[in-house]
């Protein structure tokens, strides 16, 4: 076992990925989660090959095969009639190019898989200690090489390093003096899951389950992303549109079926047929983000995931980037003794911050591209999309290649 230990604030996908990756390097971790129970929201997630290959390295290849679906294509469509603007082939050609597949998964299933890699006895290395009901309120750096995460009740937990994986409203980020302003993107998202069987039974919507794809409808000032998860038992819906002041102020709230239908009035009849089947919880989320910055570490304290680089989800990469962070963090801390932790964290930031910044910018750029009102610029955009090589999405290729890792070969099983 390594002679350093790490305290991770936040047990989201980023925090658990870090716990699993550090465990694999023989490093003990304590994960502090403010919520009373561990978990993720009921929604889907697209995982790029840049993150899938990390998950495979973490010993989760079989688990990912069981819980996720390999995306064969992304299909970009016009909002009014669903006509296809352009397709990008993924599937086997993406796996061959990037060494790992592009996946669609239920968030809770990925969260559980990462939790098992962090704590199950079947995995090598010291199991992480997870503490719920443990909101970190500040960091005590009076002993710089042994910082402490301080909880609301005054308890403090010391480690050789403290990693802030505590999301967009990060306490750790505020502590290290990083710019902490949260920006409104101007958008909000309807999020819901629809019964896959109901979608399969209706000939109008059946195409959603006939072919495992990410279907995206582009419309004026909004877009809609639809794909199956949980072996097609559920259909994930993310509907983006202009935000209201009230949703911006509240960050998130539940929405009614009428609100969802009203937002997509006049869209492709297949969209209407699909949304009309939404009979479970519907949520509305403000799409907030933070401006890129590169000072993710101060001394023995560093940031990871949304705490470091929250972004709008228009390249579907926030969670994938946090998984990449975890892999690089673990590589840099592997073999470090207490005196080397500070430099190891600086090296982690050096390898990750510029890439994550570029992904943040690419995501924001897509906002303008996706939401063009009908007209000349929209027609030019569609033309550009049609001209792209169908086997390689040139815009995303460098993202899917991922941060170069020291251990490149993906284990066979
Ligand atoms: C609509 C939408 C669609 C998306 N789609 C995709 C996609 O397809 N692919 C993709 O890769 N990404 C996607 N994302 C982005 C992705 O959801 C996030 O980037 C990712 O979940 C961030 O994980 P995280 O662990 O860094 O942060 P979080 O998920 O925010 O987790 C932070 C954790 O820290 C805890 N915490 C917070 N403060 C404290 C504290 N003080 N003390 C202790 N614990 C604390 C929280 O309770 C939480 O458990 C999407 C986002 C949205 C909004």
Image (cartoon, grey):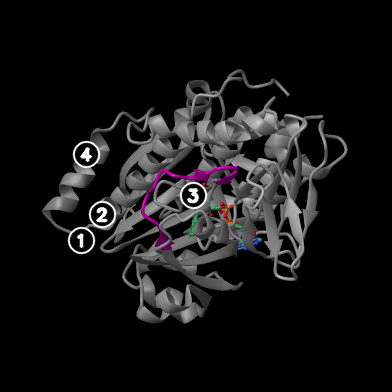
Dot 1 and dot 4 residues touching (CB under 8 Å)? no
At numbered mark 3, what does the secondary structure look like: helix, strand or loop? helix
Q: Which of marks 4 and 3 is in front?
A: 3
Q: How far is disc 4 from disc 3 in space, using C-alphas?
A: 32 Å
Q: In which quarter of the image is the C terminus?
A: top right
Instruction: For marks 2 and 1, give the one nearer the viewer.
Output: 2
Residue highlighted by disc 4: 384
Q: What element carries label 4?
A: helix
Q: Label 1: how many residues lie within 10 Å, few (<14), some (14-19) or many (20+)? A: some
SS at mark 1? loop
Tell me where residue 363 appears, x and y as whole percent: 36, 48
Q: Name the residue under label 3.
A: 308
CA gap, disc 2 and disc 1:
10 Å
Instruction: Kindly identify which numbered label has been placed on residue 368.
Output: 2
Q: Distance between the residues labelled 2 and 3?
A: 23 Å
- Tell us which disc is closer to us: 2 or 4: 2
Task: Read off the magenta span.
Answer: 288-302
What residue sits right under mark 1 in the picture?
373
């Amino acid at each position: 076992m390594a002679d350093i230990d790490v305290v991770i604030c936040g047990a989201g996908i980023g925090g658990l990925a870090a716990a699993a990756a550090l465990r694999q390097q023989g490093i003990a971790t304590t994960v502090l989660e403010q919520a009373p129970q561990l978990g993720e929201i009921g929604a889907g997630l697209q995982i790029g090959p840049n993150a899938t290959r990390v998950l495979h390295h973490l010993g989760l290849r079989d688990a990912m095969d069981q819980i996720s679906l390999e995306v064969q294509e992304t299909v970009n469509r016009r909002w009014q009639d669903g006509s296809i603007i352009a397709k990008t082939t993924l599937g086997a050609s993406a796996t061959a190019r990037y060494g790992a597949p592009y996946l669609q998964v239920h968030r809770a299933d990925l969260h559980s898989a990462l939790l098992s890699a962090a704590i199950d006895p079947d995995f090598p290395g010291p199991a992480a200690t997870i503490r719920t009901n443990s909101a970190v309120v500040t960091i005590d750096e009076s002993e710089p090489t042994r910082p402490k995460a301080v909880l609301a009740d005054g308890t403090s937990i010391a480690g050789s390093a403290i990693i802030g994986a505590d999301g967009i409203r990060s306490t750790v980020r505020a502590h290290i003096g990083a710019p902490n302003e949260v920006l409104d993107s101007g958008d909000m998202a309807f999020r819901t899951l629809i019964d896959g069987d109901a979608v399969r039974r209706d000939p109008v919507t059946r195409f959603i389950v006939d072919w495992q794809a990410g279907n995206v409808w582009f419309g004026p000032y909004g877009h809609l992303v639809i794909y199956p998860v949980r072996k097609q038992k559920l259909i994930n819906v993310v509907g983006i549109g202009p935000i209201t002041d009230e949703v911006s102020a509240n960050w998130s709230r539940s929405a009614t079926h009428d609100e969802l239908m009203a937002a997509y009035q006049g869209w492709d009849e297949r969209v209407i047929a699909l949304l009309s089947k939404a009979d479970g919880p519907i949520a509305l989320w403000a799409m907030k983000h933070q401006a890129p910055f590169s000072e993710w570490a101060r001394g023995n304290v560093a940031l990871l995931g949304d705490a470091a680089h929250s972004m709008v989800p228009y390249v579907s990469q926030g969670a994938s980037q946090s998984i990449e962070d975890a892999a690089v963090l673990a590589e840099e801390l592997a073999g470090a003794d207490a005196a080397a932790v500070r430099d190891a964290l600086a090296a982690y930031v050096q390898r990750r911050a510029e890439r994550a910044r570029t992904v943040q910018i690419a995501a924001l750029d897509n906002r303008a591209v996706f939401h063009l009102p009908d007209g000349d610029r929209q027609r030019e955009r569609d033309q550009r999309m049609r001209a792209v090589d169908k086997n390689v999405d040139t815009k995303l290729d460098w993202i899917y290649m991922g941060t170069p890792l020291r251990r490149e070969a993906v284990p066979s099983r």
